Amino acid sequence: MQITNVCPDQADVIICGGGGAGCVIATRLAEARPDLSVLLLEQGADNRNVDRLKRPLDSLFWLFQQNPYLRWLDCEPEQKLGGRQPRIPVGNILGGGTSINTLMYNTPAASDFDDWKQPGWAYADLEPLIRKSIHYSSPEKPGSSPHSDEGVFEVSQGGHVVSYGDAYAKACRLVLKDAEECDNITNYRTGHGCEFEPKLITRDGRRSNVADAYLHPTKAKNLIVVTGVTIDKVLLEGSTAVGVKVIGDGQPSTAFGKKERYIKDVKGNRMVVVTCGALGSPAVLERSGIGSPEILKKAGVAVNVDLPGVGHDLDDHQLICPMYRATEGAYEPFDEYARGVDSVKGPIDAEYDRTGRGIAASNGFDYGMKIRPTESEIDSMGREFKTYWKRIGAGKVDKPLCSNVILPYFYSYRPPPSGKYFCIGGFHNYPASRGSIHISSPDPFAPPIATTGFLTRPEDLPVHVWYYKKQREFSRRLPFYEGEEPDSHPRFDPKSPARLRSSDDPNRTDKPVEDDSIPYSPEDDKAIEDYVRENVATAYHSIGTCAMKKREVGGVVDAKLSVHGVKRLKVADLSICPSNVGTNTTSVVLLIAENASQIFLKELDDGQRRARSRESKL
Ligand SMILES: Cc1cc2nc3c(=O)[nH]c(=O)nc-3n(C[C@H](O)[C@H](O)[C@H](O)COP(=O)(O)OP(=O)(O)OC[C@H]3O[C@@H](n4cnc5c(N)ncnc54)[C@H](O)[C@@H]3O)c2cc1C
């Protein structure tokens, strides 16, 4: 494998986008077919020597610190959010999102895949690929999940586990009596449970990412990786993909240190695979003239293939992160570290450099919950939600309506103020609302027009109100809870029994929720709704913009990931998900990429066999 900034003239297989999916597919294809030349093209830089990205704890600070490897997509103002413009971060470096994400490991519901109803994509088809992709070294009981230590992408406890596991388990039991307490909840079948979660961190305390796990260790000689190169468009001859047009942006490559600027056509002899992510792949298709004629015309691009589903149905998880004050000294000094307190940071950094352990080798995400509503809670969430949930989640006990994780620090777009904090980062797994992302011009560097669509459907807001109350009941049962951090909670009337609490009067309890729960009036509920509109944000899990469905129902690719109406062109990343998955998405992109690799290899083999038999007949 060679990493360069000089783009060759041709390759048998071109993979466009070296992110979560692209690095996996490029490696698998190159290793399985040494006779084929494989070219991986990535817009961002080579990740090998970017040490800052390898330290797990640093990923907590990128919401408020500069990170040149993370780009922000500014979405359109959303009417339902009071005109607020959500922002979505995107990884822009080899490894994509996996090189900059917050390292939480989580798994979807098995039924999520079955619900896709696509041949070859049911959970039973994908389960063997969990073992192929993930090297799991967390202390769980054998047989409690489909993981093994056979894969290459490490999932482990990392270099540190936080100290409050027992207190967490007790609080969960008091709030979610019927929740399953499992060895860990990353088992594809627990939809209502709480417990330990491992992390996207290696056993020696470094970030797990697809470039380091798959690409860099490969011995495949037939793989060329070009960084600092932007895919402008796929080149079509009639309805066949024959290559790509690229623009080298002059970023230095670690291998050559050369700055070169070029525009060139690269010939793809057998297959072109677009893996630019849910926020990048639609743009490549649209610039190639594949998409909705109306949108293409508006952007000044000639229509080659009328495919209206491209860029539609942008789906995400909707996140809220209420913050709480914590007792000083309750657990490890994450906040002090983030504030850069020398006496704290120095020893932690030194320990990490020496041993790869300590809190710098952790993101602090060790415990989380998956929650389903009870029948009476469903009734209280309104007719629209009830009908919706009956269709997508009722009876599917592996599907959590919301998931969360407890973060033992101040996680925000602003730096931590003085004091000690914890935060409950939780998201709605199956929102009904959808957004879109489209190009505005043929220029590959022009920003796209994106809408999140958050809260545009009436089914979604009641879920947030229900979930907000749940997580607050949980928080006040933690022994280190000292009241709410007012800027990240609803503005309840100070005279309401639901009012925010201070450290002088934290309203802490250790009773079960049936015996002691905060009463909320309709005005309090309204305050929660306002809070959600003002704060709901991306959970960084964009999917669905090139969905694997029939063209007539808005689909872009078929079950073999072929773009409808185009030969030799594939899309293989999170954009292909036809419906949502109840999890953080790294586990899903790994499965998509592993399955895509098998599909593509079979097609490449079949193609070769057909060519040989044609030759022998001549
Ligand atoms: C801030 C953040 C935090 C996250 N936290 C977690 C977490 O804790 N746990 C978890 O499981 N998941 C998390 N995720 C999600 C996870 O990382 C992504 O879902 C996953 O990386 C998506 O993989 P992908 O291949 O679909 O897209 P990406 O990983 O985004 O890959 C797309 C690649 O294509 C490149 N590209 C785009 N356009 C072009 C172009 N025109 N030319 C060339 N290259 C191009 C991009 O630079 C990128 O490298 C997080 C994501 C983000 C952004």
Image: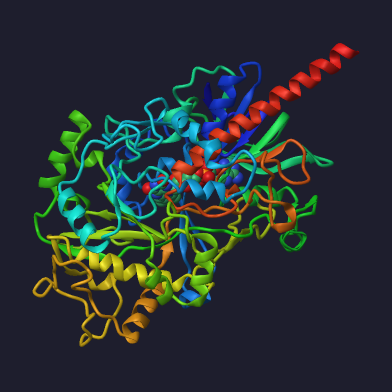
Residue 43 to residue 477: above or below: above
Q: Indicate whether 567 appears above or below 382.
A: above
- Locate residue 611 relative to residue 331 in the image: left or right: right
Q: Is residue 178 left or right of residue 165?
A: right
Left or right side of 97 for 309: right
* Outermost right residue: 618
**154 up-or-down from 297: above or below:** above
Q: Residue at x 85, y 18 (%)?
A: 614
Give x and y (percent) for residue 244: 70, 37
Q: Quadrant of the C terminus?
A: top right
The part of the image, by quadrant, that contains residue 198 is top left
Left or right of 128: which side holds 59?
Answer: left
Residue for point 50% across, 25% down: 256
Where residue 63 appears, as percent x and y from the top left, is 35, 56
Q: Residue 529 location, x and y as percent? A: 39, 77
- Is residue 417 in view? yes
396 shown above or below 274 = below
Residue 467: percent from left, percent from top: 35, 67
445, 48: nearer the viewer: 48
Front residue (pair 210, 552): 552
Quadrant of the image occupied by residue 148? top left
Query: Is residue 8 visible to us here?
Result: no
Residue at the image position 58 percent from the left and 23 percent from the top: 30
